Image (cartoon, rainbow, N blue to C red):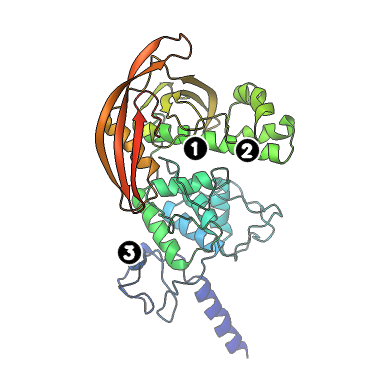
Amino acid sequence: MKNTLRVLVWTALVLALSLVFADPNEASAKEFKDVSKKHPNYTAIQEMQKAGYITGYPDGTFRPGEPVSRKHVASLLDQVLKFPQPPTDKLVFTDVPKNHMYYKPIMKLYNKGIISGGMDGKFNPNASITRIQMAKMLDLAFELNMKEPAQFEDLHFLHWGYVHASALYSNGVTKGDKGKFLPNQSVTRAHYAEFLYRAMKVGKSPSGSSVTKEKAVDLTMRLPIVIEGIRIQGKVDNQTYNQLRSKQLPYATKAFVDGLLKEDYPSVCTECDSFLFPGLTIEPSMRFNYKQPDANTLQVHTVSFSNVLSSGGFVDYAFKKESGSWKMDDFDWTEVGKKNFELTKAEAERVVKLNYAYSSNVKITYVSQAKKTGEDPVTKEKYPFTEYKFTVDTKDGRDTVLVNSDDGLAY
Protein backbone atom coordinates (compact mmCIF):
# COMPACT_ATOMS: atom_id res chain seq x y z
CA MET A 1 0.00 0.00 0.00
CA LYS A 2 2.80 2.39 0.93
CA ASN A 3 4.67 1.60 -2.30
CA THR A 4 1.52 2.23 -4.32
CA LEU A 5 1.05 5.57 -2.61
CA ARG A 6 4.66 6.54 -3.32
CA VAL A 7 4.19 5.73 -7.01
CA LEU A 8 1.04 7.87 -7.17
CA VAL A 9 2.72 10.80 -5.44
CA TRP A 10 5.76 10.56 -7.69
CA THR A 11 3.61 10.40 -10.82
CA ALA A 12 1.67 13.48 -9.70
CA LEU A 13 4.91 15.33 -9.06
CA VAL A 14 6.28 14.50 -12.52
CA LEU A 15 3.06 15.68 -14.15
CA ALA A 16 3.12 18.91 -12.18
CA LEU A 17 6.64 19.61 -13.39
CA SER A 18 5.91 18.72 -17.00
CA LEU A 19 5.82 22.30 -18.22
CA VAL A 20 8.61 23.61 -16.04
CA PHE A 21 12.07 24.26 -17.41
CA ALA A 22 14.65 21.56 -17.59
CA ASP A 23 18.37 22.23 -17.42
CA PRO A 24 19.24 24.06 -20.69
CA ASN A 25 22.49 22.12 -20.84
CA GLU A 26 20.52 18.91 -21.14
CA ALA A 27 18.41 20.03 -24.12
CA SER A 28 17.40 17.35 -26.61
CA ALA A 29 15.71 17.39 -30.00
CA LYS A 30 12.92 14.93 -29.34
CA GLU A 31 9.53 15.13 -31.04
CA PHE A 32 6.23 15.06 -29.18
CA LYS A 33 3.77 12.36 -30.22
CA ASP A 34 0.85 14.79 -30.42
CA VAL A 35 2.62 17.72 -32.14
CA SER A 36 3.13 16.94 -35.80
CA LYS A 37 5.20 19.06 -38.14
CA LYS A 38 1.93 20.40 -39.56
CA HIS A 39 0.85 21.76 -36.17
CA PRO A 40 0.63 25.61 -36.38
CA ASN A 41 2.78 25.97 -33.25
CA TYR A 42 5.24 23.19 -34.09
CA THR A 43 8.30 25.43 -34.55
CA ALA A 44 7.77 27.34 -31.32
CA ILE A 45 7.16 24.16 -29.31
CA GLN A 46 10.24 22.46 -30.77
CA GLU A 47 12.51 25.45 -30.24
CA MET A 48 11.33 25.86 -26.66
CA GLN A 49 11.87 22.16 -26.05
CA LYS A 50 15.35 22.17 -27.63
CA ALA A 51 16.34 25.08 -25.39
CA GLY A 52 15.30 23.04 -22.36
CA TYR A 53 12.34 25.23 -21.49
CA ILE A 54 9.58 22.61 -21.77
CA THR A 55 9.75 18.86 -21.32
CA GLY A 56 6.27 17.53 -22.00
CA TYR A 57 4.76 14.54 -20.22
CA PRO A 58 6.30 11.14 -19.36
CA ASP A 59 4.25 9.44 -22.09
CA GLY A 60 5.95 11.53 -24.79
CA THR A 61 3.06 13.91 -25.35
CA PHE A 62 2.89 17.67 -25.01
CA ARG A 63 -0.90 17.97 -24.82
CA PRO A 64 -0.96 21.25 -26.79
CA GLY A 65 -4.70 21.84 -26.42
CA GLU A 66 -4.76 21.78 -22.62
CA PRO A 67 -5.01 25.10 -20.74
CA VAL A 68 -1.81 26.37 -19.17
CA SER A 69 -2.01 27.25 -15.47
CA ARG A 70 -1.04 30.54 -13.83
CA LYS A 71 1.67 28.88 -11.75
CA HIS A 72 3.33 27.38 -14.83
CA VAL A 73 3.26 30.73 -16.61
CA ALA A 74 4.99 32.30 -13.60
CA SER A 75 7.59 29.54 -13.47
CA LEU A 76 8.42 29.73 -17.17
CA LEU A 77 8.75 33.51 -17.12
CA ASP A 78 11.06 33.32 -14.12
CA GLN A 79 13.25 30.72 -15.79
CA VAL A 80 13.49 32.72 -19.03
CA LEU A 81 14.17 36.13 -17.50
CA LYS A 82 15.86 35.03 -14.25
CA PHE A 83 14.21 37.53 -11.92
CA PRO A 84 16.07 38.43 -8.71
CA GLN A 85 15.10 36.82 -5.44
CA PRO A 86 12.83 39.04 -3.29
CA PRO A 87 14.73 40.60 -0.35
CA THR A 88 12.52 38.86 2.22
CA ASP A 89 10.13 35.93 2.27
CA LYS A 90 6.59 36.94 3.07
CA LEU A 91 3.09 35.60 2.67
CA VAL A 92 1.21 37.65 0.08
CA PHE A 93 -1.28 35.18 -1.36
CA THR A 94 -3.28 32.98 1.01
CA ASP A 95 -3.23 30.13 -1.51
CA VAL A 96 0.54 30.28 -2.11
CA PRO A 97 2.19 29.46 1.25
CA LYS A 98 5.98 29.49 1.64
CA ASN A 99 6.16 25.74 1.18
CA HIS A 100 4.26 25.88 -2.13
CA MET A 101 6.20 24.33 -5.02
CA TYR A 102 5.90 27.57 -7.04
CA TYR A 103 6.22 30.04 -4.18
CA LYS A 104 9.57 31.47 -5.33
CA PRO A 105 8.76 32.17 -9.00
CA ILE A 106 5.34 33.58 -8.08
CA MET A 107 6.85 35.88 -5.46
CA LYS A 108 9.60 36.97 -7.86
CA LEU A 109 6.96 38.10 -10.36
CA TYR A 110 4.95 39.75 -7.61
CA ASN A 111 8.05 41.60 -6.41
CA LYS A 112 8.59 42.92 -9.96
CA GLY A 113 4.98 44.14 -10.20
CA ILE A 114 4.11 41.67 -12.95
CA ILE A 115 1.32 39.93 -11.01
CA SER A 116 -1.01 41.21 -8.33
CA GLY A 117 -3.48 38.44 -7.64
CA GLY A 118 -7.20 38.92 -7.04
CA MET A 119 -9.25 41.13 -4.74
CA ASP A 120 -9.69 38.16 -2.41
CA GLY A 121 -5.96 37.97 -1.68
CA LYS A 122 -5.48 34.81 -3.73
CA PHE A 123 -3.31 34.05 -6.75
CA ASN A 124 -5.29 31.01 -7.91
CA PRO A 125 -2.14 29.17 -9.07
CA ASN A 126 -3.99 26.20 -10.56
CA ALA A 127 -6.45 28.28 -12.58
CA SER A 128 -5.97 28.60 -16.30
CA ILE A 129 -4.71 31.95 -17.55
CA THR A 130 -6.72 34.07 -19.97
CA ARG A 131 -5.29 35.74 -23.04
CA ILE A 132 -5.57 39.22 -21.55
CA GLN A 133 -3.90 38.12 -18.30
CA MET A 134 -1.12 36.57 -20.36
CA ALA A 135 -0.77 39.81 -22.34
CA LYS A 136 -0.25 41.77 -19.15
CA MET A 137 2.32 39.36 -17.77
CA LEU A 138 4.36 39.19 -20.99
CA ASP A 139 4.18 42.93 -21.54
CA LEU A 140 5.41 43.76 -18.06
CA ALA A 141 7.92 40.91 -17.86
CA PHE A 142 9.66 41.81 -21.12
CA GLU A 143 9.06 45.55 -20.61
CA LEU A 144 7.75 45.83 -24.17
CA ASN A 145 7.34 49.18 -25.86
CA MET A 146 3.87 49.91 -27.25
CA LYS A 147 4.56 51.13 -30.79
CA GLU A 148 0.97 51.64 -31.89
CA PRO A 149 -2.51 50.94 -30.54
CA ALA A 150 -4.23 47.76 -31.68
CA GLN A 151 -7.84 47.81 -32.83
CA PHE A 152 -9.52 44.54 -31.91
CA GLU A 153 -13.28 44.25 -32.30
CA ASP A 154 -13.71 42.80 -28.82
CA LEU A 155 -11.23 44.91 -26.85
CA HIS A 156 -12.14 48.55 -26.19
CA PHE A 157 -9.32 50.98 -25.54
CA LEU A 158 -10.69 51.68 -22.05
CA HIS A 159 -10.30 48.02 -21.04
CA TRP A 160 -7.59 47.61 -18.36
CA GLY A 161 -5.67 45.21 -20.57
CA TYR A 162 -5.87 47.17 -23.82
CA VAL A 163 -2.37 48.65 -23.61
CA HIS A 164 -0.90 45.22 -22.83
CA ALA A 165 -2.60 43.63 -25.84
CA SER A 166 -1.43 46.57 -27.97
CA ALA A 167 2.15 46.12 -26.77
CA LEU A 168 2.10 42.46 -27.78
CA TYR A 169 0.39 43.22 -31.09
CA SER A 170 2.75 46.03 -32.09
CA ASN A 171 5.76 43.78 -31.37
CA GLY A 172 4.41 40.82 -33.33
CA VAL A 173 3.88 38.63 -30.26
CA THR A 174 0.17 38.25 -30.98
CA LYS A 175 -1.83 38.68 -34.17
CA GLY A 176 -5.34 38.25 -32.86
CA ASP A 177 -7.95 35.98 -34.39
CA LYS A 178 -9.83 37.38 -37.39
CA GLY A 179 -9.83 40.90 -35.97
CA LYS A 180 -10.54 39.80 -32.39
CA PHE A 181 -8.28 39.37 -29.38
CA LEU A 182 -10.55 36.98 -27.42
CA PRO A 183 -9.40 38.43 -24.06
CA ASN A 184 -11.27 35.99 -21.82
CA GLN A 185 -10.33 32.82 -23.68
CA SER A 186 -8.01 30.45 -21.84
CA VAL A 187 -4.47 30.11 -23.21
CA THR A 188 -3.48 26.61 -24.27
CA ARG A 189 -0.05 25.08 -23.69
CA ALA A 190 0.70 25.35 -27.42
CA HIS A 191 -0.34 28.96 -27.64
CA TYR A 192 1.65 29.95 -24.58
CA ALA A 193 4.74 28.29 -26.03
CA GLU A 194 4.16 30.34 -29.17
CA PHE A 195 3.59 33.63 -27.32
CA LEU A 196 6.61 33.17 -25.08
CA TYR A 197 8.80 32.12 -28.04
CA ARG A 198 7.84 35.28 -29.95
CA ALA A 199 8.38 37.49 -26.89
CA MET A 200 11.83 35.99 -26.40
CA LYS A 201 12.70 36.80 -30.02
CA VAL A 202 11.65 40.41 -29.46
CA GLY A 203 13.72 40.47 -26.29
CA LYS A 204 13.58 42.67 -23.24
CA SER A 205 13.67 46.41 -23.86
CA PRO A 206 17.08 47.92 -23.00
CA SER A 207 17.31 49.82 -19.75
CA GLY A 208 19.45 52.82 -18.91
CA SER A 209 19.33 56.51 -18.17
CA SER A 210 19.00 57.48 -21.84
CA VAL A 211 15.48 57.11 -23.28
CA THR A 212 15.24 55.47 -26.70
CA LYS A 213 12.76 56.67 -29.31
CA GLU A 214 10.82 53.41 -28.85
CA LYS A 215 10.44 54.12 -25.13
CA ALA A 216 9.41 57.72 -25.79
CA VAL A 217 6.74 56.50 -28.21
CA ASP A 218 5.59 53.91 -25.66
CA LEU A 219 5.06 56.57 -22.98
CA THR A 220 3.26 58.82 -25.47
CA MET A 221 0.94 55.99 -26.51
CA ARG A 222 0.47 54.12 -23.24
CA LEU A 223 0.11 56.62 -20.38
CA PRO A 224 -2.65 58.78 -21.92
CA ILE A 225 -4.78 55.68 -22.55
CA VAL A 226 -4.28 54.33 -19.02
CA ILE A 227 -5.00 57.69 -17.38
CA GLU A 228 -8.03 58.34 -19.61
CA GLY A 229 -9.43 54.92 -18.75
CA ILE A 230 -9.06 55.52 -15.00
CA ARG A 231 -10.83 58.86 -15.24
CA ILE A 232 -13.74 57.61 -17.33
CA GLN A 233 -14.20 54.56 -15.10
CA GLY A 234 -14.22 56.91 -12.13
CA LYS A 235 -17.10 58.83 -13.67
CA VAL A 236 -18.96 55.61 -14.45
CA ASP A 237 -18.58 54.57 -10.79
CA ASN A 238 -19.68 58.03 -9.59
CA GLN A 239 -16.39 58.57 -7.78
CA THR A 240 -15.33 61.97 -6.51
CA TYR A 241 -11.95 63.24 -7.59
CA ASN A 242 -10.53 62.60 -4.13
CA GLN A 243 -11.58 58.96 -4.43
CA LEU A 244 -9.97 58.72 -7.85
CA ARG A 245 -6.80 60.65 -7.11
CA SER A 246 -4.66 57.80 -5.77
CA LYS A 247 -5.39 55.60 -8.79
CA GLN A 248 -3.73 58.15 -11.09
CA LEU A 249 -0.57 58.69 -9.05
CA PRO A 250 1.27 55.60 -10.40
CA TYR A 251 0.98 57.12 -13.89
CA ALA A 252 1.09 60.91 -13.36
CA THR A 253 3.07 63.23 -11.12
CA LYS A 254 1.43 64.80 -8.10
CA ALA A 255 1.60 68.22 -9.76
CA PHE A 256 -0.22 66.96 -12.87
CA VAL A 257 -2.77 64.97 -10.83
CA ASP A 258 -3.59 68.00 -8.68
CA GLY A 259 -3.42 70.37 -11.65
CA LEU A 260 -4.84 69.74 -15.13
CA LEU A 261 -6.31 66.31 -14.35
CA LYS A 262 -8.25 67.68 -11.39
CA GLU A 263 -9.43 70.75 -13.30
CA ASP A 264 -10.69 68.68 -16.21
CA TYR A 265 -12.41 65.91 -14.21
CA PRO A 266 -15.83 67.64 -14.03
CA SER A 267 -15.98 67.66 -17.85
CA VAL A 268 -15.12 63.97 -18.30
CA CYS A 269 -17.83 62.44 -20.50
CA THR A 270 -18.92 58.81 -20.37
CA GLU A 271 -21.46 58.97 -23.20
CA CYS A 272 -19.49 60.73 -25.93
CA ASP A 273 -16.26 60.46 -27.88
CA SER A 274 -14.66 63.56 -26.39
CA PHE A 275 -11.42 62.90 -24.48
CA LEU A 276 -8.75 64.98 -22.80
CA PHE A 277 -5.89 63.32 -24.68
CA PRO A 278 -5.83 62.80 -28.46
CA GLY A 279 -6.06 59.24 -29.73
CA LEU A 280 -2.83 58.65 -31.63
CA THR A 281 -2.46 55.87 -34.20
CA ILE A 282 0.32 56.14 -36.79
CA GLU A 283 1.23 59.77 -36.09
CA PRO A 284 4.41 59.09 -34.03
CA SER A 285 5.81 57.07 -36.91
CA MET A 286 5.50 60.15 -39.15
CA ARG A 287 5.99 63.21 -36.96
CA PHE A 288 7.80 62.62 -33.67
CA ASN A 289 10.50 64.55 -31.84
CA TYR A 290 11.75 64.04 -28.33
CA LYS A 291 14.53 65.30 -26.10
CA GLN A 292 15.81 64.41 -22.67
CA PRO A 293 17.16 67.46 -20.81
CA ASP A 294 18.30 65.21 -17.96
CA ALA A 295 18.01 61.60 -16.78
CA ASN A 296 14.61 62.19 -15.14
CA THR A 297 12.94 64.49 -17.67
CA LEU A 298 11.53 63.75 -21.13
CA GLN A 299 9.82 66.09 -23.60
CA VAL A 300 7.83 64.86 -26.60
CA HIS A 301 6.43 66.74 -29.60
CA THR A 302 4.20 64.96 -32.12
CA VAL A 303 0.94 65.46 -34.02
CA SER A 304 -2.67 64.29 -33.91
CA PHE A 305 -4.55 63.88 -37.19
CA SER A 306 -7.97 65.40 -37.66
CA ASN A 307 -11.07 63.20 -37.84
CA VAL A 308 -14.83 63.70 -37.89
CA LEU A 309 -14.84 64.23 -34.10
CA SER A 310 -11.77 66.39 -33.49
CA SER A 311 -9.44 68.83 -35.20
CA GLY A 312 -5.84 68.07 -35.99
CA GLY A 313 -3.16 69.57 -33.81
CA PHE A 314 0.34 69.55 -32.39
CA VAL A 315 0.76 67.48 -29.22
CA ASP A 316 3.30 68.13 -26.47
CA TYR A 317 3.90 65.84 -23.50
CA ALA A 318 6.29 66.15 -20.57
CA PHE A 319 7.25 63.10 -18.53
CA LYS A 320 9.19 62.81 -15.29
CA LYS A 321 10.83 59.81 -13.70
CA GLU A 322 9.82 59.23 -10.09
CA SER A 323 10.79 56.22 -7.95
CA GLY A 324 12.09 54.46 -11.03
CA SER A 325 8.92 54.94 -13.13
CA TRP A 326 8.13 57.42 -15.88
CA LYS A 327 4.99 59.49 -15.21
CA MET A 328 3.10 62.13 -17.18
CA ASP A 329 3.92 65.62 -15.93
CA ASP A 330 2.30 67.97 -18.47
CA PHE A 331 0.27 68.07 -21.66
CA ASP A 332 -0.52 70.70 -24.30
CA TRP A 333 -2.35 70.67 -27.61
CA THR A 334 -2.32 73.34 -30.35
CA GLU A 335 -4.75 73.31 -33.27
CA VAL A 336 -3.22 73.48 -36.75
CA GLY A 337 -3.33 76.75 -38.64
CA LYS A 338 -0.77 78.58 -40.72
CA LYS A 339 1.68 76.26 -38.98
CA ASN A 340 0.48 72.79 -40.01
CA PHE A 341 1.62 69.27 -40.84
CA GLU A 342 2.36 69.77 -44.57
CA LEU A 343 1.89 66.07 -45.24
CA THR A 344 3.59 64.63 -48.30
CA LYS A 345 1.74 62.49 -50.84
CA ALA A 346 3.33 59.35 -49.38
CA GLU A 347 2.23 60.32 -45.87
CA ALA A 348 -1.29 61.07 -47.08
CA GLU A 349 -1.41 57.61 -48.64
CA ARG A 350 -0.47 56.11 -45.26
CA VAL A 351 -3.44 57.93 -43.72
CA VAL A 352 -5.72 56.33 -46.32
CA LYS A 353 -4.15 52.93 -45.71
CA LEU A 354 -4.83 53.28 -41.98
CA ASN A 355 -8.52 53.95 -42.64
CA TYR A 356 -8.75 50.69 -44.60
CA ALA A 357 -6.50 48.63 -42.34
CA TYR A 358 -9.20 46.04 -41.69
CA SER A 359 -10.25 45.50 -45.29
CA SER A 360 -8.65 42.74 -47.32
CA ASN A 361 -7.19 43.08 -50.82
CA VAL A 362 -7.02 46.87 -50.71
CA LYS A 363 -5.59 48.78 -53.66
CA ILE A 364 -4.86 52.48 -53.15
CA THR A 365 -4.20 54.64 -56.23
CA TYR A 366 -3.08 58.26 -56.27
CA VAL A 367 -5.24 60.35 -58.63
CA SER A 368 -4.44 64.03 -58.28
CA GLN A 369 -3.86 66.94 -55.93
CA ALA A 370 -5.32 70.41 -55.65
CA LYS A 371 -4.53 73.62 -53.80
CA LYS A 372 -6.96 74.64 -51.07
CA THR A 373 -7.13 77.50 -48.59
CA GLY A 374 -7.43 77.25 -44.81
CA GLU A 375 -7.83 79.80 -42.03
CA ASP A 376 -5.70 80.05 -38.91
CA PRO A 377 -8.04 79.62 -35.88
CA VAL A 378 -6.18 82.27 -33.88
CA THR A 379 -4.93 84.91 -36.33
CA LYS A 380 -7.66 84.29 -38.97
CA GLU A 381 -4.89 84.47 -41.54
CA LYS A 382 -5.45 82.52 -44.75
CA TYR A 383 -2.94 79.84 -45.68
CA PRO A 384 -2.57 77.34 -48.58
CA PHE A 385 -2.54 73.56 -48.23
CA THR A 386 -2.75 70.56 -50.53
CA GLU A 387 -5.72 68.23 -50.92
CA TYR A 388 -4.68 64.75 -52.16
CA LYS A 389 -7.13 62.56 -54.06
CA PHE A 390 -6.98 58.75 -54.02
CA THR A 391 -9.17 55.88 -55.18
CA VAL A 392 -9.46 52.82 -52.97
CA ASP A 393 -10.56 49.47 -54.41
CA THR A 394 -11.85 46.79 -52.04
CA LYS A 395 -14.07 43.75 -52.36
CA ASP A 396 -17.02 46.09 -51.74
CA GLY A 397 -16.20 48.38 -54.66
CA ARG A 398 -14.34 51.63 -55.28
CA ASP A 399 -14.17 54.67 -52.97
CA THR A 400 -12.75 58.12 -53.56
CA VAL A 401 -10.83 59.51 -50.60
CA LEU A 402 -9.50 63.04 -50.08
CA VAL A 403 -6.76 63.85 -47.57
CA ASN A 404 -5.84 67.33 -46.33
CA SER A 405 -2.13 67.97 -46.02
CA ASP A 406 -2.58 70.52 -43.23
CA ASP A 407 -4.37 68.37 -40.62
CA GLY A 408 -4.48 64.82 -42.01
CA LEU A 409 -8.27 64.73 -42.32
CA ALA A 410 -9.37 61.92 -44.66
CA TYR A 411 -12.90 62.02 -46.08
The answer to whether residue 232 is seen in the rendering is yes
Q: Are marks 1 and 2 in contact (CB under 8 Å)?
A: no
Point out residue 61 in the picture as x, y percentages from the top left corner. Answer: 41, 78
Question: Residue 404: which quarter of the image?
Answer: top left
Identity of the residue drawn at 61% across and 36% down:
272
Q: Amino acid at mark 1?
A: Arg
Badge 1 marks a residue whose secondary structure is: helix
Q: Amino acid at mark 2?
A: Ile
Figure check: 59 above or below 56: below
Upstream in sequence: badge 1 or badge 3: 3
Badge 3 marks a residue whose secondary structure is: helix
| Quadrant position of the N terminus in the picture | bottom right
Judging by the rendered image, the residue that carries numbered circle 2 is 230
| Quadrant position of the C terminus in the picture | top left
Badge 2 marks a residue whose secondary structure is: helix
Q: Which mark is residue 111?
A: none
Please name whichever residue, 252 or 8, is drawn nearer the observer in this view of the structure: 252
Work out how far the residue at label 1 is from the one at label 3, CA to CA, in angstroms: 32 Å
Question: Residue 375: which quarter of the image?
Answer: top left
Judging by the rendered image, the residue that carries numbered circle 1 is 222
Figure check: 57 above or below 406: below
Point out residue 387 in the picture as x, y percentages from the top left corner. Answer: 32, 26
Comparing marks 1 and 3, which lies closer to the viewer?
1
Left or right placement of residue 195 versus residue 70 in this view: left
Identity of the residue drawn at 48% across and 66% down:
188
Please name whichever residue, 277 or 397, is drawn nearer the observer in this view of the structure: 397
Left or right placement of residue 319 versus residue 410 in this view: right
Identity of the residue drawn at 31% across and 49% down:
362
Label 1 crowding class (10 Å Cα cut-off): few <14, some 14-19, many 20+?
many
